[in-house]
Amino acid sequence: MTETALTKMKDRPSNGVMKKLTILGLCALCLAQTACVNVTAPDKPIVINLNISVTQEVVYRLDGQAKNLIQSQPGIF
């Protein structure tokens, strides 16, 4: 054999390496063909019904002196 033929034989991957590369290529091909998920917007608008009841109770207490002052001078406030 010539020197260039020997060099080519040495640079050539072994049979086991070729099998591994082939299997790896097939796995990559299979992974590339996985299913897709499509998301589309609904035709009708989304309606959210919120039944909220808000009640507020204000409780105030006046000191006896303040109450008497307001009653005696109603124009103070």
Image (cartoon, helix red, strand yellow):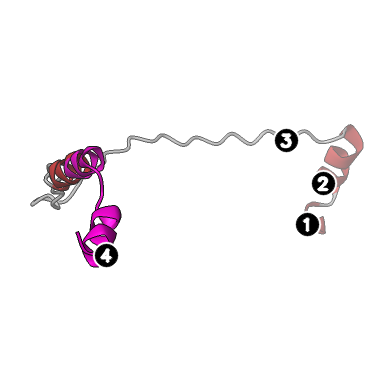
- What's the residue at 81%, 44% (across, down)? 71
Above or below, 52 against 29 in this view is: above
Foreground mark, 1 or 3? 3
Identify which residue is drawn at 78% across, 57% down. 77
Q: Earlier in the sequence, mark 2 or mark 3?
A: 3
Mark 4 = which residue? Answer: 3
- Nearer the camera: disc 2 or disc 3: 3
Kind of residue at disc 4: Glu
Q: Amino acid at mark 1?
A: Phe
Report the span colored magenta: 1-22
Residue farthest to the left, as pictured:
43
Query: Between 55 and 73, which is closer to the camera in this rendering?
Result: 55
Furthest residue to the right?
Answer: 65
Residue 41, placed above or below residue 22: below
Secondary structure type for disc 3: loop
- From the image, tell me which residue sits under label 1: 77
In the image, taking residue 67 as reference, residue 24 lies left or right, namely left
Query: Which numbered dot is residue 60?
Result: 3
Amino acid type assigned to the residue bearing label 2 in the image: Ile
